[in-house]
Amino acid sequence: ADTTPHAVQPYEVLLLGCSTWGVGEMQDDWNDFLFKLKDMDLKNKTVALFGCGDSVSFSSSFCDALGVIYHELQHTGCTFTGEVDPSEYRFDGSGGVIDGKFVGLPIDDNNESDRTDTRIKKWTDRLKVTVSSGSRPAMRLRSVAFRSHRSYMFQFRTPKSIFTGCVKTIFKTT
């Protein structure tokens, strides 16, 4: 939450992650960041979303934060990628499902931790293909899952930089 929205400007690919708290609420530290980010020009940027939620205790609002971020950034000019088929999850409803797909990777480490690593690998493998296609230089994507208070980290390596997104720190460069 200590990253400013303007820090994303030099990057072509943004991995944005947020937990859903309670009944469909975003993490508090996302509010100011998203409020400023949604007013920026993100044309020519690819955005992949991921989020954590609890599909049992909050089955009717599972990973709603994905949908909130998607809707807020929809008019910024960015291109979204990384949608996920919801049929592999057990839940009653989600604001993160739009047009029959999750708009990003939902993670439920409370109830389906045995599927987390496979889901991350499958998602990041698809991102490798999606992000590497087109006019962008080929990107090497490496997924790294660190389990620490339900935090997950992903890294994109390009010839020039490393992108790291984490549900606790949102966006950070190293």
Image (cartoon, rainbow, N blue to C red):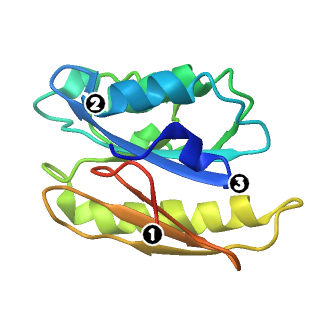
Q: Is residue 77 above or below residue 125?
A: above
Mark 1 highlights which residue?
121
Specify the farthest residue to the right. Answer: 135
Sequence-wise, which precedes: disc 3 or disc 1? 3
Which quarter of the picture shows residue 45?
Answer: top right
Residue sitting nearer the eye, 11 or 105: 11
What kind of residue is marked 2?
Answer: Phe
Disc 2: which residue: 62
Can see residue 104? yes
Q: Residue at x 39, y 60 (%)?
A: 119
- Is 137 rendered above or below residue 167? below
Tag 1: residue type? Lys
> Mark 3: few, some, or many residues within 10 Å (few <14, many ≥20)?
some
- The residue pinned by badge 3 equals 12
As measured in the structure, the alpha-carbon distance from the residue carrying label 3 to the one carrying label 1 is 22 Å
Going by the numbered disc 3, the residue's amino acid type is Glu
Q: Position of residue 82 (x, y in %)?
A: 57, 49
